[in-house]
Image: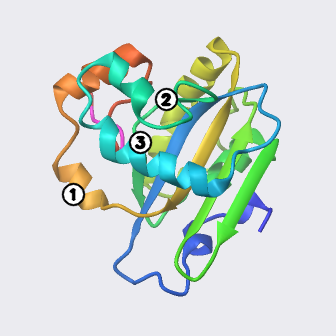
Amino acid sequence: MLDSAKWDFEAFRCRWTYDYEKTFAYWLCAIDRGVLEIPPLTELISAMRSQCDIEEQAVHVDRFDAIHKFSPGILRTLAPVSLAIRWSPFPTAVEMFGDPIHQKFQKDDHRAFACAVWRPEKPDKPATAPINVHEQHFRALVPLLVDRVNQQRCDLFVAGMIGWEYDTERDCPISPETEKAMSDYGYVYTQRTRLKKR
């Protein structure tokens, strides 16, 4: 399905997706502008899983460059693997940035995974209000993401699939020590769920 504007949460439900699987995970990275083709999705799925499982244990900056084969390399993570309930960022990203310059979508009976790449500019304010807190969170991150990828002369990479548990991550946030390491490494945000009240 090569129309990322239609990659909402329902598009990722598969034959063996259970009703209790309500969490959508997405990964926000800077990607080298020299990349002409997105790597194989099986490798990106493995990298995203490693990123999610290992990054919250890191307390030193150098740990982030040893998580998977793409870092250091073509990808540089900009936020922890982020979680939302029954919401995918792809349609909003298309609305804000237009059609991606690269995209891939893979689906079978057990799992769907997608990724897309944009060369973004800061979009105008939306004509309508966000439909939920997850879209509000993503839209709030966008200016930070755009600034960072442009500073690094990179493009914006977004990948996602159904998985992990939103409630667990919300109730057990990333530690202050890891948040500091993430900030020092260059993350623009340091928790998996919606923006914290300031």
52 to 16, vertically: above or below: above
Residue 59 image offset from top left, x and y in percent: 23, 24
Marks 1 and 3, how far apart in space?
A: 17 Å
Q: Is 22 on the left or on the right of 95, as rendered?
A: left
Q: Is 164 on the left or on the right of 120, as rendered?
A: left
Q: Mark 2 or mark 3: name the one nearer the start of the chain.
A: 3
Marks 2 and 3, how far apart in space?
A: 12 Å
For disc 2, the neighbor class at 10 Å (few under 14, some 14 to 19, many from 20) is many
Marking on residue 51 = 3
Circle 2: element type: loop
Q: Pointer 1 and pointer 3: residues touching (CB < 8 Å)? A: no
Marks 1 and 2, how far apart in space?
A: 22 Å
For disc 1, the neighbor class at 10 Å (few under 14, some 14 to 19, many from 20) is few
Find out whether residue 194 is within the magenta segment: yes
Amino acid found under the numbered disc labelled 3: Gln
Is residue 49 something that shows in the picture? yes
For disc 3, the neighbor class at 10 Å (few under 14, some 14 to 19, many from 20) is many
Amino acid found under the numbered disc labelled 1: Thr
Residue 29 image offset from top left, x and y in percent: 56, 34
**Residue named by callout 2:** 78
User: Main structural element of the magenta stretch: helix, strand or loop?
Assistant: loop
Residue 145 image offset from top left, x and y in percent: 56, 27
**Residue named by callout 1:** 168
The stretch of residues the image draws in magenta is 193-197
Q: Quadrant of the C terminus?
A: top left
Q: Mark 1 or mark 3: name the one nearer the start of the chain.
A: 3
